[in-house]
Amino acid sequence: MSVVTATVLAATPLPAVAAAPLPPAPAVMGKPAAADGAQLIRYKIVLGRCKDTCRIKVKITNISRKTLYDVSLNARLKVNKTKAGSCYDYVGTIRAKRQRWAGCTVRSSRLASLWNRWLDGEIRWDTHVSTVVHYEYYR
């Protein structure tokens, strides 16, 4: 048996905030393309409350017949194409045809200062989340 390591990258733009903060708006990602072949997962990115801290949740679905080990999530948040912060979550094992939720919270001084600038009316609030899901499985 050999261990295979895979990494999946996806990004999703989220709607801009007009006059007031919007409620959580889900953004659905399909099956991402990869350089080495078909991926074993699908996932959906949901941005929760996002003011001076942002909650990012990802629903990871194992679409294969293999058990995935050592699954982890890295998320990077950008506001107006400026990096506002990043976060990490260890998911663990996902059995075949099952799903798990992963989530992390971005807290940074850059995000807080961007939020204060938005409250003052200086900037727009266009958020963009990119995620990397890393997993291993046995052949």
Image (cartoon, helix red, strand yellow):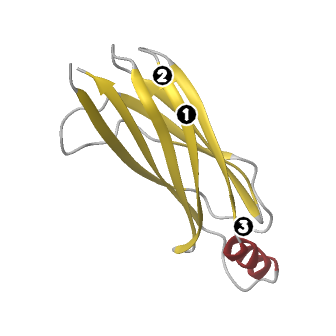
How far apart are labels 2 and 3 at the CA level? 38 Å
Which residue in the protein does label 3 denote?
18
Tag in front: 2 or 3: 2
Does the CB distance between marks 2 and 1 fall below 8 Å?
yes
Q: What is the quadrant of residue 102 in the picture?
A: top right
Query: Disc 1 on helix, strand or loop?
Result: strand
- What's the mark number on residue 38? none
**107 above or below 82?**
above
**21 above or below 68?**
below
Q: Who is closer to the viewer here, 115 or 104? A: 104
Q: Position of residue 33 (x, y in %)?
A: 27, 42
Query: Disc 2 on helix, strand or loop?
Result: strand
Q: Tell me: 48 left or right of 71.
A: right
| Residue that appears at 72% across and 74% down | 109
How far apart are labels 3 and 1 at the CA level? 34 Å
| Residue that appears at 70% across and 57% down | 54
Q: Tell me: 76 left or right of 103.
A: left
